[in-house]
Image (cartoon, rainbow, N blue to C red):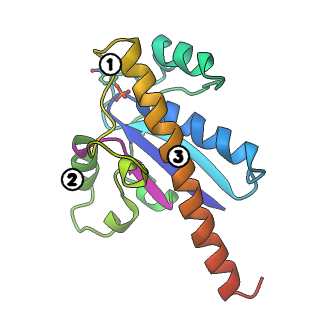
Amino acid sequence: MTNVLFVCLGNICRSPLAEALFNHHVTKMGLTVHYTADSCGTANYHVGDPPDHRTIRNAEQNGVIIRHRGRQFHPLDFESFDHILPMDQSNYSNIARMDESGTWLSKVKLMRTFDPSPDELSVPDPYYGNERDFQKVFDILHRSTLELIRFLENTRSVASDRSGI
Ligand code: 4NP
């Protein structure tokens, strides 16, 4: 089982959508036995809150249901998850600061590393934006989570070739 954690600032816009899209693709591809996904924020502003109503509505309009309650990143997440995917460079720095020895940083990669057509390194924060900004985030995360799954599936098939399964 591969555990994936998506991270943003508030855990109400970008990362719960990334989690929902990842699960959406994984389910469609029949891979649910191989993956679990979760999301969290580096800030504690929205702990226990549902996702932002604009994110929920935009995802619904695109055929994706989101269910999540906000939680904050915890250093134990470094051990529990195989891949930690911050949405932007500020989220990346916040996480990196909690790993002073650099033990876990190889697990941490910017989400847009997996975007096949990136125009910048960060998934832009839509919190102060409009509907178009929410749709842009949806499009970025839709294609990036798909590419992430392709990458993880390649890793998994290499690992199972090696173990002879
Ligand atoms: P997110 O967006 O990090 O994508 O969940 C934000 C949500 C809330 C705030 C900032 C960004 N906030 O300042 O409350």
* Quadrant where ligand 1 appears: top left
Mark number, residue 59? none
Looking at the picture, does residue 111 appear above or below residue 139?
Answer: below
Residue type pointed to by label 2? Arg
Q: Position of residue 92 (x, y in %)?
A: 27, 49
Q: CA distance from mark 1 to mark 2?
A: 24 Å
Q: Position of residue 78 (x, y in %)?
A: 41, 58
Q: CA distance from mark 1 to mark 3?
A: 21 Å
In magenta segment, residue 2: no
Q: Residues within 10 Å of mark 3 (few under 14, many from 20)?
A: many
Q: Nearer the viewer, residue 31 or 5?
A: 31
The residue that appears at 47% across and 32% down in the rendered structure is: 139
**SS at badge 1:** loop
Question: Which residue in the structure is indicated by mark 3?
Answer: 145
Looking at the picture, does residue 117 appear above or below residue 11?
Answer: below
Looking at the picture, does residue 19 appear above or below residue 110?
Answer: above
The residue that appears at 65% across and 54% down in the rendered structure is: 35
Question: Which residue in the structure is indicated by mark 2?
Answer: 97
The residue that appears at 60% across and 69% down in the rendered structure is: 154
Q: Is residue 152 left or right of residue 73?
A: right
Q: Residues within 10 Å of mark 2 (few under 14, many from 20)?
A: few
Q: Is residue 87 left or right of residue 93?
A: right
Tell me the quarter of the image containing the C terminus: bottom right
Residue type pointed to by label 1? Tyr
Q: Upstream in the sequence, badge 1 or badge 3?
A: 1
- Residue bounds of the magenta highlight: 82-89
Question: Which residue in the structure is indicated by mark 1?
Answer: 127
The residue that appears at 50% across and 57% down in the rendered structure is: 81
